[in-house]
């Protein structure tokens, strides 16, 4: 009888541990990002850091969720979300009307616009109108890719990462790179041979993406974003990544 009690107790203990492990896994949110988008998400050694990383960590604290980052190519993020390999996307992603057909977006957390990087000795390009007939580097899935791909007589050279596009520009394999302003500014500040051109492109809003059916999660994330903006955390992160220099 005592032996049976031990066996039953052991089985119950194993079941409890398995249940707790499963529950912990179910409680974890997998956050998809593309750590090639300074200062929003980038790598310092093995760590993924940046404005978006700090922001979603603050959100996770408020909604009491464990999170794990999954770094992947930007154009793979939406398919990964829809196939449930990840649960959330935060990657400087613009909440376009086309994307809204497939996913839900949180309230916007940052406004940006497109800019152009050229080599410092290039005086031919001063705006989008001058890209005709040029080889223009873009990153797959980025807003720059969407804009340039629709332009006539522009040869879009598509790269899997921002760094690849910038290397191509520095080696003059492309005439320009179209990129969101903040990461473009970072590359400009770090490379004396590049020139940054501001454009009059329409402001775009970055937001956090979730699956259409995850409406409860969407509400929690939006409530957390509001809390972060109200309690001063958002302003602190803006100061850290955009006003104080990197």
Image: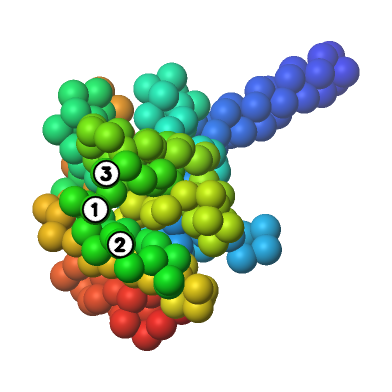
SS of the residue at dot 2? Answer: loop
How far apart, in angstroms, are the residues tagged by discs 3 and 2?
11 Å
Residue at the extreme right of the image, as rendered: 3
Tell me if residue 204 comes above or below residue 140 in the rendering: below
Residue 170 place in picture, x, y as percent: 54, 61
Tell me if residue 242 comes above or below residue 22 in the rendering: below
Q: Which mark is residue 124?
A: 2
Name the foreground residue: 156 vs 162.
156
SS of the residue at dot 1? Answer: helix
How far apart, in angstroms, are the residues tagged by discs 3 and 1?
6 Å
Residue 195 place in picture, x, y as percent: 38, 71
Name the foreground residue: 5 vs 189.
189
Tell me if residue 3 comes above or below residue 32 in the rendering: above
How far apart, in angstroms, are the residues tagged by discs 2 and 1?
7 Å
Residue 85 place in picture, x, y as percent: 49, 27
Q: Which mark is residue 192?
A: none
Q: Quadrant of residue 8?
A: top right
Mark 1 lies on residue: 130
Name the foreground residue: 203 vs 192.
192
Residue under the image location 12 percent in, 53 percent down: 202
Residue under the image location 18 percent in, 24 percent down: 101
**Few, some or many residues within 10 Å of mark 2 (<14, 14–19, 20+):** few
Task: Say whether residue 242 is left or right of residue 206.
Answer: right
User: Are dots 3 and 1 in contact, CB under 8 Å?
Assistant: yes
Going from N to C along the chain, the mark reached first, 2 or 1, is 2
**Few, some or many residues within 10 Å of mark 1 (<14, 14–19, 20+):** few
Mark 3 lies on residue: 132
Tell me if residue 184 comes above or below residue 174 in the rendering: below
User: Are dots 2 and 1 in contact, CB under 8 Å?
Assistant: yes
SS of the residue at dot 3? Answer: loop
Viewer can see residue 46:
yes
Residue under the image location 41 percent in, 82 percent down: 245
């Amino acid at each position: 009888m005592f032996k049976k009690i031990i066996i039953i107790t052991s089985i119950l203990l194993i079941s409890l541990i398995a249940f707790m492990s499963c529950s912990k896994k179910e409680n974890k949110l997998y956050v998809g990002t593309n750590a090639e988008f300074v200062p929003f998400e980038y790598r310092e050694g093995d760590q993924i850091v940046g404005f978006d990383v700090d922001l979603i960590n603050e959100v996770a604290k408020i909604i009491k969720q464990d999170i794990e980052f999954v770094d992947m190519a930007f154009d793979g993020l939406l398919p990964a979300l829809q196939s449930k390999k990840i649960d959330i996307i935060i990657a400087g992603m613009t909440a376009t009307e086309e994307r809204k057909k497939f996913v839900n977006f949180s309230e916007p957390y940052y406004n940006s616009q497109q800019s152009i990087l050229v080599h410092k000795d290039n005086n031919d390009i001063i705006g989008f109108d001058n890209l005709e007939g040029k080889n223009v580097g873009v990153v797959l899935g980025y807003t720059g890719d969407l804009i340039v791909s629709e332009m006539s007589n522009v040869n879009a050279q598509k790269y899997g990462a921002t760094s690849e596009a910038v290397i191509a520009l520095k080696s003059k394999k492309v005439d320009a790179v179209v990129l969101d302003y903040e990461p473009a500014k970072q590359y400009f500040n770090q490379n004396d041979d590049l020139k940054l051109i501001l454009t009059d492109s329409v402001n775009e809003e970055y937001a956090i993406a979730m699956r259409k059916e995850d409406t409860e999660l969407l509400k929690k994330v939006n409530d957390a974003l509001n809390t972060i903006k109200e309690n001063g955390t958002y302003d602190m992160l803006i100061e850290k990544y955009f006003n104080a220099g990197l």
